[in-house]
Amino acid sequence: MDLYLEPGFLTCVASEVVDLDRVEILSHRTVYDPFLRQVGLLLKSELELALGNGVASSPINSQLYVESMATTLVMHLLRHYSTAKQPNQASQEGLSPASLRRVMSYIHEHLADDLSLTEVAAVVPLSPHYFATLFKQSTGETLLQYVTRCRIERAKKLLAHKPLAIADISQQVGFRDQSYFTRVFRRYSNMTPKAYRNRL
């Protein structure tokens, strides 16, 4: 299994947390890294699940998901395989209240869209990776976690108040695949969308 990060992407992420003139990723050809193995297996299992179900729009194709995983890999490389000092932590203040309100308003207005980290960061505007750090400091959640939670909460309201098909609700809250929507809904609610509606 090969995992490849675009060098330009790695540079963009690294520039937010370290002085690039002092960073060099060292070559390690024989090291065993359980974290990298786990990330690889996670990506592999998601792809196999999508292929096995014949699903064209898999969660693995979500821009938020891919960008989050790639950013995590870069930070892991910087921490464990670079000659730089530990990355300086970004400001702990997070986003300003006004910026956070603008971002949240934008997210709620575009829940049905395939939101990307780059797109949401442009609302402030900040670079995507610096924005991701400040957003997590402000909310305690990653952008992907926050967007997913908002989508599930909106889905609950639609299930309660509108006689829409579950497939239509899935589309309206930004899930292109109904089976994936059902899995995520169950993870957040401990029941399927159909069971939730029946209980109401």
Image (cartoon, rainbow, N blue to C red):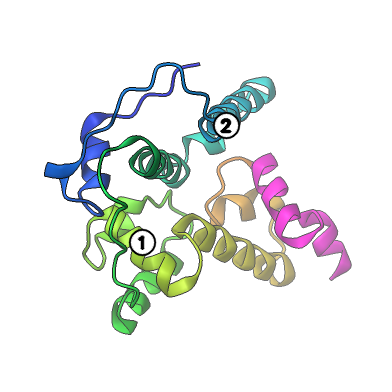
* Residue 130 location (% of width, % of height): 28, 59
Label 1 vs label 2, nearer the camera:
2
Q: Which residue is drawn at 53% across and 27% down?
A: 40
- Would you say 87 lies left or right of 152 here? left
**Is residue 109 among the parts visible in the rendering?**
no
Which residue occupies the foreground of this view, 53 or 129?
A: 129
Chain part drawn in magenta: 178-200
- Would you say 170 lies left or right of 32 here? right
Q: Is 196 within the magenta?
A: yes
Residue underneath mark 1: 133
Q: Is 79 within the magenta?
A: no
Earlier in the chain: of badge 1 and badge 2, it is: 2
* Residue 22 location (% of width, % of height): 16, 43
As drawn, the residue found furthest toward the bottom would be 97
Which residue occupies the foreground of this view, 154 or 119?
A: 119
Which residue occupies the foreground of this view, 52 or 139?
A: 139
**Residue 164 in which image quadrant:** bottom right
